[in-house]
């Protein structure tokens, strides 16, 4: 029995598991949010929380410790420069796991893992007008030549009678 054995093994040997979690931690630091299986997210959470706690110390020893786990200078720099200062007032709970619907291919439980203090990025795409998209594709000389002829060929629109007036006429 595995009483009080907290290591989530993920069906891998120790070296493979450490590399996997290190790579997941680097991806989380770079992208602020990653989509992975629920088991991997739950295994990553303690490692990510410990890294932020190390990052809050901001000493050379702490940087070397983080470098030993992450193995990438850019990730360590971002951890100490951006993520740890955001979590300075917090005593724990630096990450959250959001469950998603089952993956369609193999029905695996999938989840997002993200920083709780991550800046919210709202992406708004301005819809392009339908007519201007076609004109932008043409060269300018052709567009100028095509516009007057296109306007001259269009017939004037008649206002359509309402249905109630049509029924009254019958």
Image (cartoon, rainbow, N blue to C red):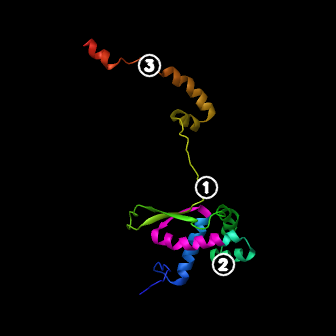
Q: Is 55 in the magenta?
A: no
Residue bearing mark 3: 157
Q: Residues within 10 Å of mark 1 (few under 14, many from 20)?
A: few
Q: Which residue is mark 1?
A: 119
Q: Quadrant of residue 106?
A: bottom left
Residue 52 occupies which quadrant of the picture? bottom right
- Magenta stretch: give its range: 30-53
126 displayed left or right of 155: right
Numbered label attached to residue 68: 2
First of labels 3, 2 by sequence position: 2
* Quadrant in which the C terminus is drawn: top left
| Separation of marks 2 and 1 at Cα, in angstroms | 27 Å
Task: Tell me the residue at 44%/85% (across/down).
Answer: 3
Query: Residue 167 occupies which quadrant of the picture?
Result: top left
Q: Residues within 10 Å of mark 3 (few under 14, many from 20)?
A: few
Residue farthest to the right?
Answer: 60
- In the rendered view, does 87 fall on the left or right side of 170? right
User: Which one is in front in this view, the residue at disc 2 or the one at disc 1?
Assistant: 1
Q: Main secondary structure of the magenta part?
A: helix
Furthest residue toward bottom = 1
Q: First in sequence: mark 1 or mark 3?
A: 1
Residue at horizontal 55 percent and vertical 41 percent from the top: 126
Mark in front: 1 vs 3: 1
Q: Can you say whether 125 is above or below 2 in the image? A: above
Q: CA distance from mark 3 to mark 2?
A: 73 Å
Q: Is residue 111 above or below residue 129?
A: below
First of labels 2, 1 by sequence position: 2
Q: Are marks 1 and 3 in contact (CB under 8 Å)?
A: no
Q: Quadrant of the N terminus?
A: bottom left
Front: mark 3 or 2 = 2
- Give the x, y percent position of residue 88: 67, 64
């Amino acid at each position: 029995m595995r009483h009080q054995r907290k290591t989530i093994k993920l069906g891998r040997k120790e070296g493979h598991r450490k590399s996997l979690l290190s790579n997941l931690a680097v991806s989380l630091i770079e992208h602020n949010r990653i989509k992975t299986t629920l088991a991997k997210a739950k295994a990553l959470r303690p490692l990510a929380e410990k890294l932020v706690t190390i990052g809050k110390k901001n000493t050379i020893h702490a940087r070397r410790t983080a470098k030993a786990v992450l193995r990438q200078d850019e990730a360590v720099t971002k951890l100490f420069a951006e993520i740890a200062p955001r979590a300075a007032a917090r005593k724990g709970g630096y990450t959250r796991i959001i469950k998603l619907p089952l993956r369609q291919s193999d029905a695996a439980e999938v989840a997002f893992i993200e920083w709780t203090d991550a800046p919210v990025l709202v992406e708004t795409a301005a819809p392009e007008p339908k007519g201007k998209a076609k004109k932008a594709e043409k060269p300018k000389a052709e567009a100028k030549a095509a516009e007057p002829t296109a306007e001259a060929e269009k017939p004037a629109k008649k206002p359509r009678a309402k249905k109630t007036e049509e029924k009254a006429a019958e």
